[in-house]
Amino acid sequence: MKQEPLFYVERPEQNVAGPYDLVQMAGLLRKKIITMETLTRLESEEDWKPFCEQSQYIVVLEIPADAVSMRLTALDEEARAPKTPIPLPSTETIMKLGAAVIASLVAGGISFLIAKSDPTAGFCLEVIGGGVAGGAQCMIMARELDEDYMTLLMIFFIPLFDIYYFISNIWEYFPYFCAKYMGAAIAVAAAAGIAAGSLH
């Protein structure tokens, strides 16, 4: 189904209002909040032009006064929908996180067995795993610095906000978290393997 066009409207002092659907634009015209000469642009475009020059202008003139805006209805339903304090991850996200945990455990187990039988190889795995985990943590911190100061203050000083932040931005950080925890699992398992091998 073709998506209904949405308009932005230029307001006094170079403020921009919107987006509005066709029913809303018809209401704004009737209330004389906008005129046929008001500068508008489609949501998918950059060029501003008088509303009367938009191809949808004729359609808007024919919309009856009792027409219901589907966009306003959808926004109202969204506002009324119950929201959880922390966004719940989707099934796909849970499956990928589970796969990452299993992969980390498998990598850790293999690292433990190698380190137990060969301490030199175990030491190399410990260094490599620690390096990968440290590098991933640096990438996470560098990505966080792209946020505004308010978000950074909330991450560091408001309890549990970091959990909310990372869940909300899970796909931006997912590769870094995978590298961090897999590297950490390899490094810790290698250290444990070296210790276990030295006991025999």
Image (spheres, rainbow, N blue to C red):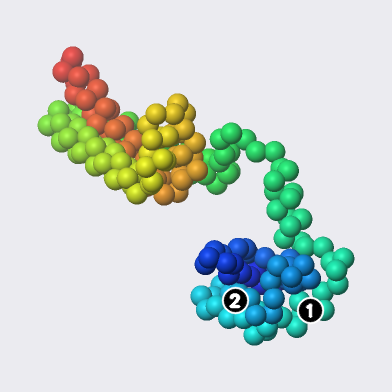
Instruction: Specify the quadrant of the image occupied by residue 6.
Output: bottom right
- Residue 66, placed above or below residue 136: below
Mark 1 vs 2, N-terminal side: 2
Instruction: Residue 126 in the image: state x and y as whole percent.
Output: 20, 32
Nearer to me, 145 or 87:
145
Question: Which three-letter amino acid code belongs to the residue tagged 2?
Answer: Leu
Q: Kindly state the secondary structure of the residue where label 1 is placed.
A: helix
| Side of 172 relative to 132 (left or right) | right
Crowdedness near tag 2: few (<14), some (14–19) or many (≥20) residues, C-alpha within 10 Å: many
What amino acid is found at the position of numbered circle 1 in the picture? Leu
Q: Position of residue 172 (x, y in %)?
A: 41, 49
Q: Residue at 51% of width from left, 75% of height from top?
A: 46
**Which corner quadrant of the image does residue 63 belong to?**
bottom right
Label 1 or label 2, whichever lies nearer to me, is 2
Residue shown at 60% from the left, 76% from the top = 39
Quadrant in which the N terminus is drawn: bottom right
Give percent across and percent down for residue 151: 42, 40
The residue that label 1 is drawn on is 61
